[in-house]
Image (cartoon, rainbow, N blue to C red):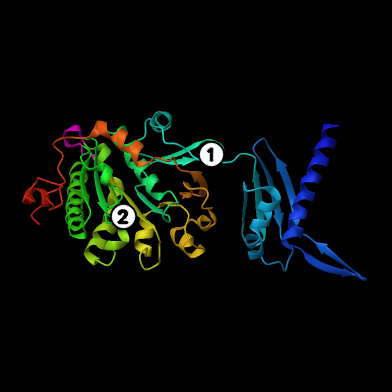
Amino acid sequence: MQKVRGFIRRQWLKAQLKKAFHSAGLYVKYRSGDREIPVYPKIHSAIETSDKIEYVFTLINGMDPKEVMKKEYVFRQVFGRNTDVKGDLKKFVLTVYRKTFPKELKYNYNTILPVIDGLNLPIVAGMDRHGQWHVYDAINEPGLLISGEPGAGKSSQVRSIITTLIQYKKPHELEIYLGDLKMSEFHLFYDIEHVKSVCIYPEDLRKMLTYLTREMKRRGELLNKYRVTHVNKLPESEKVPYILICIDEFVMIMDDKDMKAMLIQLVALGRALGMVCILSLQRPSHDILDTKIRSCLTVRMGFRVSDFSNAKIIGTTGAEKIAKETPGRFLLKRSDIIELQAPFLDEKHAEKILRAYKSSKWKNRFTGDSRMSSEPLTDDILGGL
């Protein structure tokens, strides 16, 4: 009896998919006498589990595979918003999820801590539709590119990542260097012990990148001296802190060949040296994200973008389909692409958390603005610049 019920259920599920095919116009017409008979894509399986229904189907020869993706909205109309279609030339997988994302995922470090415990430099990406956190170790994957329109959740994500690392690592274990070329993202991190500089002008950012390039060379010489492959393997007497370099709207320095070369070098060689780069921008384009820098930024976070072209450039196709009503939703690309909800951390909450990490002796290392720094730009800081 149970087998019969299972068979009937599968047939019903397949009938629902055929209805979707018909509504989307995904069929080929064959004439039999005076009648036109629709022939739908072949449904190979309809597997139902506690958390999803997964259909596998193939198109009839002569059907345009692009039409499947164009009509994705029809599948969502029939099966609901929590529907995903993936495929290529002929074979497609349609997944209908039973669970959905939380409307808002509030940032809570105590909730995150058990998930990141034991990682060297954890990046908390977000939570999937099944309530599972997705995190990774930036020491193993040191290049992160984040893109998203205003209001999509990019700024909150960057804020969340930096705030988490400040709580997770001690100041002698992690140094943070920030480039805030929009002059609006990183003001919360002034006076924080871990933060060595917040640069808001390109000329100051040049000094910062020059210093970090020299530091990269110094660390490389240490690895060579002790014949080790990573700074984690250096003897205790030579231990160096991890370095996080985060630059918002880095597009503003891409026309400067020297700064661009330094940035690419830092992103490309930072893994063994314990130097991690996070670069963010609103609107990606081919002339900004050339193949050199894209190949080094192996992890991508694509929040909502304006069109398919922008999503494709960052490597997170589908980000253009993220609804405005779901801020914080994004696509994470590592070995594959997964949809996640980022934890939301507003400025007020971040400010409250960061108070405990402020220092009265804080100095902004690379800026010449006396309102933000009392430290002179000496040769020992700039490396003789």
Front in this rendered view, residue 303 or 238: 303
Marks 1 and 2, the one that precedes in the sequence: 1
Left or right of residue 347: residue 342:
right
| Front position among marks 1 and 2 | 1
Left or right of residue 280: residue 25:
right
Residue type highlighted by circle 1: Pro
Q: Are marks 1 and 2 in contact (CB under 8 Å)?
A: no
Q: How many marks?
A: 2
Q: Is residue 297 above or below residue 115?
A: below
Residue at mark 1 to residue at mark 2: CA–CA distance: 36 Å
Residue assigned mark 1: 102
Residue assigned mark 2: 268
Find out whether residue 24 is within the magenta segment: no
Q: Secondary structure at mark 1?
A: loop
- The span shown in magenta is 235-241
Residue 212, position in %: x, y?
20, 51
Residue 204, position in %: x, y?
18, 56
